[in-house]
Each structure stands twice: as structure tokens, then as C-alpha cells.
Amino acid sequence: MNWALHKKNLKKNNSIEMGYPGSGMSPQINNGDTIVITTMNVGLFKEGDIVFCKISKNHYVQPIIKVSINGNRLRYHIGDNKNNIIGVIGISSIFGKVTKKD
């Protein structure tokens, strides 16, 4: 999966279409399902949204399990479809939101 190309195209076009890689979101999204990822305003991310993000050096398309506040910054707890937390990130690590699945 060429994540750098997906990020570049998302930034350029505000929306990308891609095949979901893997089974980590099954049964909501299955391996090979076509998803549309769209850039969003910061205030529009909420618990339950499925986002395209980066945690450490890895890229994910996973749900926001929880939103918390640390000082004056929002923190997004990214997890899997079983509510296990993969990592906690800031807004700069979220590139877009899944807005459609075919």
C-alpha cells in the first residue's frame, strides 16, 4: 500500500477512493471494499468516525474510540473494531475520514 501517495492525493483532491487493505475492520469494512476518504474540518471528528491516520510509523484506517482533552488539545484514541486502543494521536496525525463504503 502506497500510503504516501494516498496522503498526497488526499491533500491535492480533498477526497480519495481506495480498496481497504486487510480485515482489521471486518465486518464493518472488509478486505478489498472500496472506501472514500475525505478531508474534514478539525471539529468534525468524533467518536465512532473511521479515519485515515498515522500512529508512530504506521498508517491505519480505523475508528476513533474516544476523544479526550489534554490541556487545550484534543487527543484521539484510535482503536480496532473490538475497541482495543492502538494509539492516541493529535489532529495532525489524522488525514481524513471514511465518508463512504461500497
Image: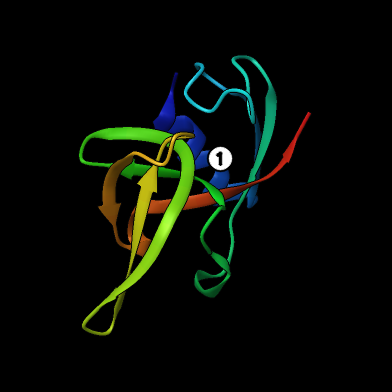
- Of residues 70 and 9, the one nearer the viewer is 70
* Residue found at x 47% / y 39%: 62
Which corner quadrant holds the N terminus?
Answer: top left
The residue that label 1 is drawn on is 9
Q: Quadrant of residue 80?
A: top left
Q: Quadrant of residue 40?
A: bottom right
> Residue placed farthest to the bottom in the image?
72
* Residue found at x 22% / y 35%: 57
- Of residues 46 and 3, the one nearer the viewer is 46
> Residue placed farthest to the front in the image?
82
Taking 3 as reference, is 89 left or right? Answer: left
- How far across and down, in percent of the image, does residue 46 sit? 53, 64
Q: Residue 63, relative to residue 74: is it above or below?
A: above
Q: Residue 5, relative to residue 1: is it above or below?
A: below
Secondary structure, mark 1, is helix
* Residue found at x 63% / y 24%: 27
* Residue found at x 33% / y 42%: 54
> Residue placed farthest to the right in the image?
102
- How far across and down, in percent of the image, does residue 79 sit? 38, 42
**Number of other residues with Cα within 10 Å of mark 1, as a class: few under 14, some 14 to 19, many 20 or more:** some
